[in-house]
Amino acid sequence: MFFAGVVLYGVILNLKEVSLREALLEKGITEVKDVRLIVDRKNYRIELYSGKLLIKTYKAVFGKNAGTLKISAEDNVTPIGNYKICAVDSNSKYHKFLHLNYPNEQDAAEALKQSYINNDEFNAIVLADNKDECPPEETKLGSALGIHGIGTYDAIFKNLPFSFNWTNGSIAVSNENIDELFSIVKIGTPVKITY
């Protein structure tokens, strides 16, 4: 009974959310140009910008581990840094998936300095980064991180009125919200993750 009440309260809160189309109308623009995303871990949100203009804010959740330094594929930390979308997947178990180029050259340099990865792993990550490709998954840092939907349990998780971090380090939004982001985000879109 309590859980049902919590979800119902979340449904009521979500009724206030405006669509991307409505947000564009409110800003007096018809399209989003120079798209960039700022992921604010402290406030559990993703901010969508068109150039310097904030268009819309999305509720988001992150990795199970609240740490700020990602040192392995299994640590469940959402990394902090400047990334970009390196691939898009419309057929994901999480509805849709926008892959981030984590780890990038900066992450690899720090990991090598701290001896989390070896020279071969460092070189493989740097090579992928220089080619604007997604990094290899075979390194200790992993690479299967991105922005994705919730998938099957969307109706429950999107309606929680509190933030419940459950991912492997990726950033999760509702299925409807990943649909909106998927419609405007392209390969190369910059994504800044802050804390």
Image (cartoon, rainbow, N blue to C red):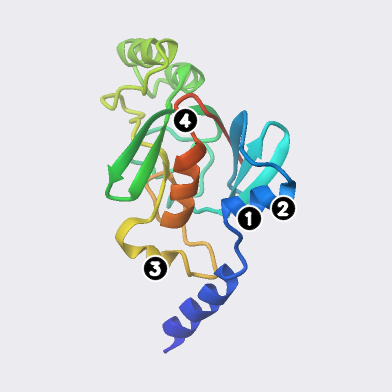
**Which quarter shows the N terminus?**
bottom left
- Identify residue type, mark 2: Glu
Question: Which numbered disc flags the more N-terminal residue, 4 or 1?
Answer: 1
Q: Which residue is mark 2?
A: 26
**Callout 1 touching callout 2 (CB < 8 Å):** yes
**At 51% from the left edge and 19% from the top edge, which residue is drawn?**
106
- Identify residue type, mark 4: Lys
Q: Which residue is mark 1?
A: 22
Report how far apart the C-alphas of labels 1 and 3 lie in the structure: 22 Å
- Is residue 41 or residue 100 the one in the foreground? 100
**At 35% from the left edge and 30% from the top edge, which residue is drawn?**
143
Report how far apart the C-alphas of labels 4 and 1 lie in the structure: 21 Å
Discs 1/3, front? 1
Q: Which residue is mark 4?
A: 186
Q: Secondary structure at mark 2?
A: helix
Discs 3/4, front? 4
Q: Secondary structure at mark 1?
A: helix
Answer yes or no: is residue 103 visible. Answer: yes
